[in-house]
Image: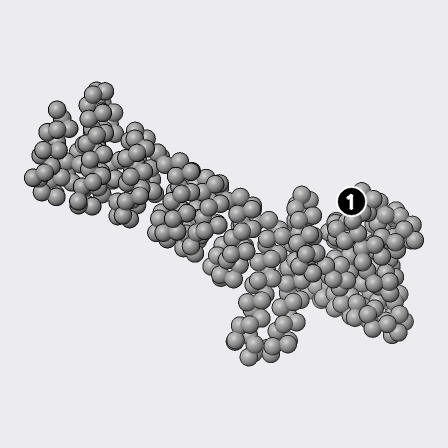
Amino acid sequence: MFIQSFLKWSETAKVAERAQAAAALGKAYVQGTMAEEERRSAEAAMAMLMDDASPKVRIALSEVLCRSTRPPRSIILALANDQIEVAGHVIALSPVLNDSDLVDIVATGRATLQQLTAHRRPLGVAVCAAIAEVGGERAIMDMLDNESAGVASISLKRLAERFGDHPEIRSRLLDRNDLPCAVRQSLVERLGAALAVFDLAQSTIGGERLRKVTEEACRDVTLKLAETVPANEMPALVEHLRMSGKLSPAFLMHALCSGNVDFFAAAMVSLSGIGDARVRGLLVEGREVAIRALYREAGLQPNLVGPFLSATLMWRQASKSEKGVEAAEIAERLILAHASDAENDPDIGDLLRIVEQMHVAWQRQASRARAMRLIAQAA
């Protein structure tokens, strides 16, 4: 009787009256005090309201149902698939919508609906994965700003692939503590590439000089990452660098001279195919002939094996010394040990120039640190 009376009345009621009635009906329903027969009648009435010619009626119903767990899924899904003014409330807030529903909404490609979904709290891993895969720029940024969003590592990787050249998204990704190290390094490279073609920088510094400065900066940042990366992420970082052609002799020598033995060992494992325990054993206590064989297996040019062997033995000796040896001292000793080789072999000369650059940089750091200590003592 209720549904019949409601429908008869709605045929002649004005839009404002129908919207008011829809809101009242929805409020009564979500309160949960209706008897079983009344509840079924109310659901039937709400289903009929889905066909109301005026969106104002459906908006009124959406506003009162969007926060409740009581409404039938059929009603909520109908509202979610309505025009944006109607759908917005339930997409952003309704607890009735599950992750599968939200993934379908994201997959429609409608930018505003994706943004509304990205604002939900909490936001599940599957929904985040869908946004990462097909979401627009604005939805991506909203998702990354949503502290409750469960963005998986694989989704972060996908975002870096899709939007690594987008300044705002790249910045948001780099600010994340959970960004995998390999992904962070790839974004650093993308940032470097963006700076290298920046018109103002090119006109100020010059194209070739800018390219060199950018490459050095990216290398230094990557090495810093390698010093702090968790052990479980080290193989992924090394593999990423290997696949992108970044594990050059110069890069490896920089890591070795810096004393980043963990990264260097992981790189040797990746390049040589020899097991981790075996590689680390060779670096720590292996004979010279075995270390040479390791470096050759890793693909180092035969003429560069000597400097790498020297650096390895120097660090091995330093690790056993009570006073220890600083990286700058290792670099200086390596330059002296292979000075004559550098004169006769351009490849070794190029490698030692990298070592010399490191040596100069470390000396400057040491001088600054000494100066700061003197200032502190004088204060």
Q: Quadrant of the C terminus?
A: bottom right
Foreground: 178 or 378? 178
> Which residue is pictured at 79% across the width and 52% down the height?
272
Q: How is the image coloured?
A: one colour
Q: Is residue 356 above or below residue 177?
A: below
Residue lying furthest left in this view?
A: 12
The image quarter containing residue 251 is bottom right
Q: Is residue 256 above or below residue 197?
A: above
Identify the image quadrant of residue 374. bottom right
Name the residue located 53 percent from the left edge and 59 percent from the top edge.
164
Task: Determine which residue is flagged by label 1.
Answer: 276
* Label 1: element kind: helix
Give the x, y percent position of residue 23. Answer: 19, 36
Can you give x and y, in whole percent of width and height, for residue 121 in the image?
40, 40
Q: Nearer the viewer, residue 247 or 58?
A: 58
| Image location (x, y in percent) of residue 297 | 83, 54
Specify whether residue 210 is in view.
yes
Callout 1 amino acid: Asp
Identified at 24% across, 36% down, the residue is 64
Q: Position of residue 114 (x, y in %)?
A: 38, 49
Res 377 visible: no
Label 1: how many Cα within 10 Å (few below 14, some 14–19, many 20+): some
Q: Is residue 88 above or below residue 307?
A: above
Q: Quick check: 14 left or right of 378? A: left
Left or right of residue 33, residue 126 in this image: right
Q: How many marks?
A: 1
Q: Is residue 106 left or right of residue 42?
A: right
Residue at position x 88%, y 54% from top?
293
Q: Return the residue nearer the eye: 263 or 295.
A: 295
Q: Is residue 39 left or right of residue 230?
A: left
Instruction: Point out the image quarter for the N terminus.
Output: top left
